[in-house]
Amino acid sequence: MGNTDYASVLITGASSGLGRALALIYAAPGVNLVLSGRDAGRLAAVAGACRDRGAEVSDTVIDVRDGKAMSAWMTEADDARALELIIANAGVSSNTSGGGDTDRQITETNIDGTLNSVAPIAGRMTARRQGQIAIVSSMAAFHGMPGAPAYAASKAWCKSYGEGLRGRLGRHNVGVSVICPGFVESRITAGNRFPMPMIMKADKAAAIIKRGLAKNRPRIAFPLTIYFIAWLLGSLPPGWTDRLFAKMPEKE
């Protein structure tokens, strides 16, 4: 558990934002990258940039909500070269692609998609007694957000699932880390029409995540100031925070 060098890495949602930055930071000679995304053009551009850095890259357009397709894709990749790190990064918010994703689409992508990105290989990793899984959650996971209830709930599921999975798979020497970023520059945040404190460049966020995964940290949350505030708000009684959250803007 925990590794500074991974020979085979799978990343979902790699066509833009944080997923793109993660693909680029892991791209190096001798590394096999297995990437997925929803936009063929953007994904191909990311794959090309990773190849320029010396990585061997397989890029596939796939919908993480399609469990059968995900299972077939991931097992084929694992058969070809055993996956050492899986980053379940694909996710949507209410304003992805200019708005319009419904609550059901958000939960299906962020919950079902995360499960579909982990389940096909988790058993194989435990059998090998080797591997690491990273699940991208959010600071929104610490408290329900009136402006984006489905998004916050889906990311809370990701956080809880990852924390529980860490205990289960850790017995078999498989690491699991939950990633809780604050605002990171991406297509999702580009659609927000409200102040985003301490918003971070995607490449800086990817560097923090890479360092945390190398140490097999249970939770990789950043920036620390926003993490403390999110943790504190999530710890307070709801009656104390109702008025504050009622004034927050809606993502739509």
Image: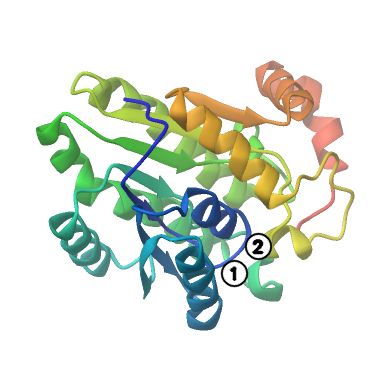
Q: Is residue 142 above or below residue 108?
A: above
Lateral position of residue 147 relative to residue 13, left or right: right
Q: Is residue 189 above or below residue 132?
A: below
Position in image of residue 234 (x %, y %): 67, 23
Q: Which residue is mark 1?
A: 101
Question: Which quadrant, please, contains the C terminus?
Answer: bottom right
Lateral position of residue 43 relative to residue 231, left or right: left
Question: Quick one: 55 or 229, which is closer to the camera?
Answer: 55
Mark with earlier residue (2, 1) = 2
What residue is drawn where x is 44% and y is 41%? 135
Q: Is residue 121 visible?
A: yes
Q: Which residue is mark 2?
A: 94
Lateral position of residue 242 relative to residue 59, left or right: right
Q: Amino acid at mark 2?
A: Ser
Q: Is residue 252 visible?
A: no
Q: Which mark is residue 204?
A: none
Q: Amino acid at mark 1?
A: Asp
Position in image of residue 167 (x %, y %): 30, 20
Question: Which quadrant, please, contains the N terminus?
Answer: top left
> How crowded is the residue under tag 2: few (<14 C-alpha within 10 Å), some, or many (20+)?
many
SS category of the residue bearing label 2: loop
What residue is drawn where x is 70% and y is 26%? 227
SS category of the residue bearing label 1: loop
Q: CA distance from mark 2 to mark 1?
A: 5 Å
Quick check: marks 2 and 1 in contact, CB under 8 Å?
Answer: yes
> How crowded is the residue under tag 1: few (<14 C-alpha within 10 Å), some, or many (20+)?
some
What residue is drawn where x is 53% and y is 51%? 22
User: In terms of image quadrants, where is residue 166?
Assistant: top left
User: In terms of image quadrants, where is residue 34?
Assistant: bottom left
